[in-house]
Amino acid sequence: MASKLLRQTLTKTYTTAVIRRFSTVAAVASPSEYEDPTGITMKGVKISGRPLYLDMQATTPVDPRVLDSMLPFYLSRYGNPHSRTHLYGWESETAVETARAQVAALIGASPKEIVFTSGATESNNISIKGVMHFYKDKKRHVITTQTEHKCVLDSCRHLQQEGFEVTYLPVGSDGLIDLDKLRKEIRPDTGLISVMAVNNEIGVVQPVEEIGKICKEFNVPFHTDAAQALGKIKVDVEKWNVSLMSLSGHKIYGPKGVGALYMRRRPRIRVEPQMNGGGQERGIRSGTVPTPLVVGMGAASELAMKEMEYDEKRIKGLQERLLNGIREKIDGVVVNGSMDRRYVGNLNLSFAYVEGESLLMGLKEVAVSSGSACTSASLEPSYVLRALGVDEDMAHTSIRFGIGRFTTEEEIDRAVELTVEQVEKLREMSPLYEMVKEGIDIKQIQWAQH
C-alpha cells in the first residue's frame, strides 16, 4: 500500500513538473505551495509566472552536467572520504582528490594548494583572520579597499577590535584602486593586502597582476577574493603572485555550500585555523568534506575551463544587446564602474529621476537586484557606489543585471522592454523629471524646509 501511494505521488509530481512553465534552466522537484493556476504569490507579490533570471552575481543555476556528476555520491557512492578501511571511503576520497585537481587546474595551481571550505565567505575569514593571527607578533597592519565584499570588511573590523590596524584604500570613480596609493600605505608591519579580483556589485576587474608585483616587491602576502572571477576571466595564481585566493562553487554553475581556498606552498603561507576538529584538509578546515558538493565544484571548474572563452564572447554580445537596447529608448542611464576593465556579465546601471525600490518592485517579471545579495535587505544606498562617488540619488536607483551561460536573447529583449516600460512609467510620475525636461537645473535649486 505504501509503495503504491509513493508511486502515485511521484507520478503526480513528475506530471505536474513537466507541464509547468519555467524560465531558462529553472527546475523544481515538486509543486510549490505558493503557486496556483492563476500565477505565483509570494511575500505579498503576485506574478503571472516565474520571472526571467538576471541575477547571476548572486548565484548561478547548477549546470545539468554538474548535477549528473554529483548524483552518484548522494545515492550509491555515499562513503565518508575520510574512512580509510573500505571501498566506500576510498572511492569518495578519490572523487575528492579528482575535484581538487580540477579546481587547481582552473587557476594554475597545484592540487596540494587547494583546501575545500563551505564557500568564499569562510575562505575570506580564514585568509584574513588566519594570517594575521598567525603572524600577530610581528605583523599588525592590513590593507584592503572600501569596495570589498562585506565578509572581508567585517573580518577586517573584527581584527581592528583585537587591536590590529586596517587601511581602507579608496577607489576612483571607475571603481579601480590607485597603485601609487597602495604602495605608499605599505608599512614594515603590514601583514596582508586583500583586494578582490572582480567586484560583485559593479563587475570591475582590479589590476591584480600589478598589485601582486607590488606585494612581491615588499614581501607582503597578497589575498584576493576571486569568487566573481573564477571561471569568468583568466585566473593564474603565478602571474598574479597571490598567496591566498578565495573561491566559490555556486558562482560557476556549481552547488551552494562549497568553496575553496588556494594557499601558496612556495613561499609557504601560514594561517591559524578558524575551526577546531578532526584535522581534515591539512588541519586548516576541520569537518567532513561534503563529497557530492566538492565533486560538483570540480565538475563546474572543468566545464568553466573548457567553455570560458565561448561563454565570454556570447555573454558580451548579450550585455551589449541589453545596454544598447535600454539606451536607444531612454536617456539618463549611467553605467557604474569602468567599462574598459569589467567582467562582461555584470552590468550595473543607474536611472536618473527614478526611485530604485519602486523600479525593483515594478520589475517583478525580471529577477534582478540593487546590489550584493548579502546586503540587499538594507534600504541604504550601496556602500560600493558611495565609494565611487556616485550621488546618493543615483546610487538609490542602481540595478545590477547579471548575465550568464544560460541567458537567452529573448530574455534580454524582454528585460529591455520591461525596464524601459517601468522607467518611463515612474518618470511620468516624477516632478523632478518634468522640471529637467523644461530645462531647469535641479542641482541649482535651493530647497526650502517646512
Image: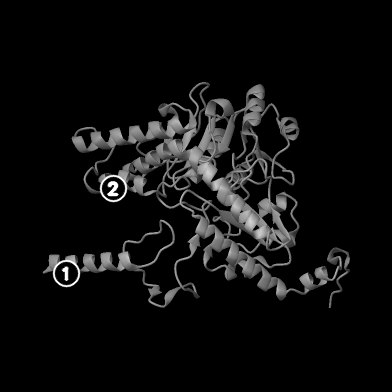
Side of 336 where 231 appears, left or right: left
Q: How many marks?
A: 2
Q: Position of residue 198 (x, y in %)?
A: 59, 42
Question: Which amino acid lies under the numbered mark 2 shown in the image of this protein?
Answer: Leu
Task: Report the residue that reaches farthest toward the left.
Answer: 1
Q: Position of residue 267 (x, y in %)?
A: 53, 21
Q: Is residue 227 visible?
A: no
Figure quadrant of residue 191: top right
Q: Is residue 77 above or below residue 187?
A: below
- Say which residue appears at 65% left-offset and 55% top-offset: 324
Proximity of marks 2 and 1: CB atoms separated by less than 8 Å: no
Q: Residue at x 58, y 57 (%)?
A: 375
- From the viewer's perspective, is residue 450 above or below residue 401? below
Q: How far is disc 2 from disc 1 in space, using C-alphas? A: 25 Å
Amino acid on which the number 1 mark rests in the picture: Leu
Q: Which mark is residue 136?
A: none
Q: Earlier in the sequence, mark 2 or mark 1?
A: 1
- Name above or below for residue 341 compared with residue 15: above
Q: Nearer the viewer, residue 434 or 198?
A: 434
Please tell me which residue is depicted at 70% across the width and 63% down the height of the picture: 330
User: Which residue corresponds to the image point at 36% horizontal and 43% vertical from the top-left?
Assistant: 296
State whether residue 409 appears in this view: yes
Could you say whether the residue bearing mark 1 is in a helix, strand or loop? helix
Looking at the picture, how far across and down is residue 436, in whole percent?
81, 68
Residue 445 left/right relative to 82: right
Judged left or right of residue 11, residue 376 is right
Q: Is residue 125 above or below residue 211?
A: below
User: Disc 1 marks which residue?
Assistant: 5
Residue linked to disc 2:
71
| Quadrant containing the C terminus in the rendered view | bottom right
